[in-house]
Structure formats: C-alpha cells, structure tokens
Amino acid sequence: MDTIQVTLPDGSTEQVPRGTTPAEIARKISQGLAREALVARVDGELIDLSRPLEENTALRILTAKDPEALQVFRHSAAHLLAAAVLELFPDVKLGIGPPIDYGFFYEFLREQPFTPEDLERIEKKMHELAARDLPNERKLVPKAEAIELYKTWDQGFKCELVEEKAVEPMVSFYTTGKFIDFCRGPHIPSTGRIRAFKLMNVAGAYWKGQEGNPQMQRVYGACFFTQQELDEYLHRLEEAKRRDHRRLGPELDLFSIQEEAGPGLIFWHPKGGLVRKLMEDWLRDELLRRGYQLVFTPHIMRLDLWKTSGHTNFYRDSMFGAMRSSARSIATSVPAYCTASCACVASRRMTRTSSACPARSKRRSRPALISRSR
Ligand SMILES: [Zn+2]
C-alpha cells in the first residue's frame, strides 16, 4: 500500500495511506480530539481538516486551546455573516471579510444602510445557520471558470479579486450555505461551533481603501471560542467606556482636550497638574533609587543627527517635518530620545579621559540613562 509517515507533536509517528486527512488522523487518536479539532498545521502551514495529506509530514491538530486556531475560527465566522446577509439581502455585492483582533468583518455594497434592526436580524440568521451546522466546503475551480461564476452572479468586486489575486491555474473556493467565497482558507469544518459572537457596528469603507471607489458597508462582529470569553470582552468594553479618559478628565476637572487646539493635546488643570507632578516625582525618585541616571536632552535637533541615527530613513512618516533655522534644517521626532541620549554619551566620551570611558554608573555594571523631555 502507498503510505506516508505522519509525525505527531509528541514525536510519535504513524504510517497512513497517502491521501488520509487530518480529520481521519484526529479520529484515530481519540473521539474527543476529533470533536474538538478545528484546523490542522502541516509543516508550519494551516490547512483544512479535510485536506488529504500527500507527503511525509509533521502534523498538529489544533483545537480551541490553540490561539492560532482563533484567527481561522473568526474567518469562518466572517463567512457565516456573509451567508446570513445573503439569505436576508440576496442583492448585496460582496467585498472582503477577514478576521480581526477581536472578531471579524465582512463588507457589502448595498444602497440602503444597514440599521440596528437589520443587524439584529442578521445575527439571528447567523445563529440559525450555525445551528444547522453547515459544512465549509473547499473546491478548486479553474481561474476562468471562477471569473465566469462571479460574472453570472453579478459580483463585480469578487471578479476583480480573482483577476488580481489568483495566480495559480486553479482557484480555491469555500461554500457555506448559499455563500461562495473566493478564499484561500483554511476554515473550520462547519458552522456549528460558532456560537459566541455579537455584531457590533457598521462602518463605511471605500472599496480597497481607495477614496473615490464605491463605499462599502463593513459589518463588524466580536467572536470568541466561548460565550464566557465573549462576555468578558463585552464587559471590558463597557468598563473601558466608563474609564474613558476623554470623559473622566473634564468630569474630574483634571484636564481638558480642546478641539480648537487639536486632538490628543492635553491641557492640565490645577488638580491634574498636581497629580501629574506627584507621579513624575515618584517615577524619577524610583529610577534614581534603582541606579539610573538623569539626563535632559533637547526636543529638536539638526536634521543631520537624525540622519546619522537612521531615524529619517526608517521613521520619517512619524517625524515632524524639518524646520529651517538659518542655513541648516532642524527636525523633531516623537517619541525617540535614543538619538539625543547617544549624543549625550558621545559628548561625555570626548570630554573625559580615556580611563573614565565609557560612561558607566559605579553602582551598576550596565550604563544607564534616562532622558527626560516634555
Ligand atoms: Zn474567506
């Protein structure tokens, strides 16, 4: 028989017929693992549990205990959202739908904006489709056929994506109910496990993020492996709202942010100023107690120094533009004090005798500098 060797995470090996799937191997290991399995990692790459294994390989079956399975899980939740939206609004045009750090989004083109009531209906439909445990099935289709499929379906954005992104002659598709997505995957086997989610909001976004392109409606959802994790996340959001410094600052008369001055610029009021002083004093005393030394450096310096330090090459986008003072440019940078601190050390090396170099605290073996600004 034509067999391949599969190496499991504990180092043990299995000889299995070529074409065996990770799902079949999970079942061989235990019924529990087969039930919990979400996706497989094969030589570092994540694949569907239903993908046949063709070569000798290292295999790991991922469950809800593996953080990397969460992205796949959330991507499948995005597909579930699209499937639900297509059931309720069959005329929407589909954009993209990736996982994000607390869940997922999918974007749609539709004349009318989605209302909060629409979101409720969509969420209900998602639960319905999840309860039906629809399989997420992968199919390979020739590129030309893929484009034809989307043309017939009048899904122009998807046509565009296939034309631009499909490099191989065969293109992978995933179907979930009525939803068919041009998608590299992988996905979890079916919709049944996706229970802990909540649609959060809708936001406008230009197609492909380019101004002038059609305005898509992005439906955002939070999604976790368990209801408890989702509840905790929603609770944290509520708490963050309660503790929002933009609300608390003015309410407690600590500071204000003034629209005329600019966003994020803080005006400290007397009470806030005192709190700030107490914290700064504590921090500085603590650093000195721990053997750090204190230096003060300028906020702005000649551009040449930022060139030497490499900042203008790598961080130009987050630096303030250069100002001209006499013949030479001066640039400011946020929030990197390393350049100025290095300049400090260099200057001390130059002015001290060689026996005193490099600058080093006697109490500690490592040179330590804190530079302070603002
Ligand atoms: Zn997808």
Image: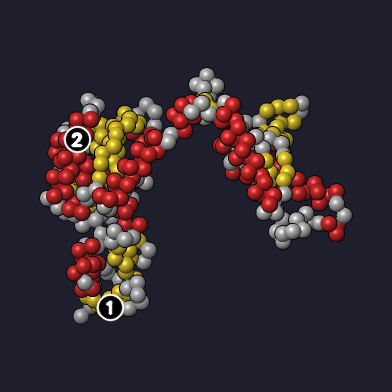
* Residue 46: % across, % down: 32, 60
Residue receiving disc 2: 120
Evaluate whether residue 224 shows in this view. no
**Residue at 14% of width from left, 35% of height from top?**
88
Image coordinates for residue 62, horizontal then vertical, percent: 30, 63
Q: Secondary structure at mark 2?
A: helix
Type of residue at label 2? Glu
| SS category of the residue bearing label 1 | strand
Disc 2 to disc 1, C-alpha distance: 48 Å
| Location of residue 218 with respect to 183 vertically, above or below | above
Q: Nearer the viewer, residue 260 or 271?
A: 271
Q: Disc 2, disc 1: CB below 8 Å?
A: no
Image quarter of the N terminus = bottom left
Q: Residue at x 24, y 76 (%)?
A: 16
Look at the image and tell me in which quarter the C terminus lies: top right
Q: Position of residue 79 (x, y in %)?
A: 23, 46
Nearer the observer, 244 or 172: 244
Q: Determine which residue is flagged by label 1.
A: 14
Q: Residue at x 65, y 41 (%)?
A: 281
The amino acid beneath tag 1 is Glu
Crowding near the residue tagged with mark 2, few <14, some 14–19, many ≥20 C-alpha atoms within 10 Å: few
Residue 130 vs residue 316, the one in the foreground: 130
Labelled disc at residue 50? none
Q: In the picture, residue 319 is in which quadrant?
A: top right
Instruction: Tell me the quarter of the picture where residue 365 sits.
Output: bottom right
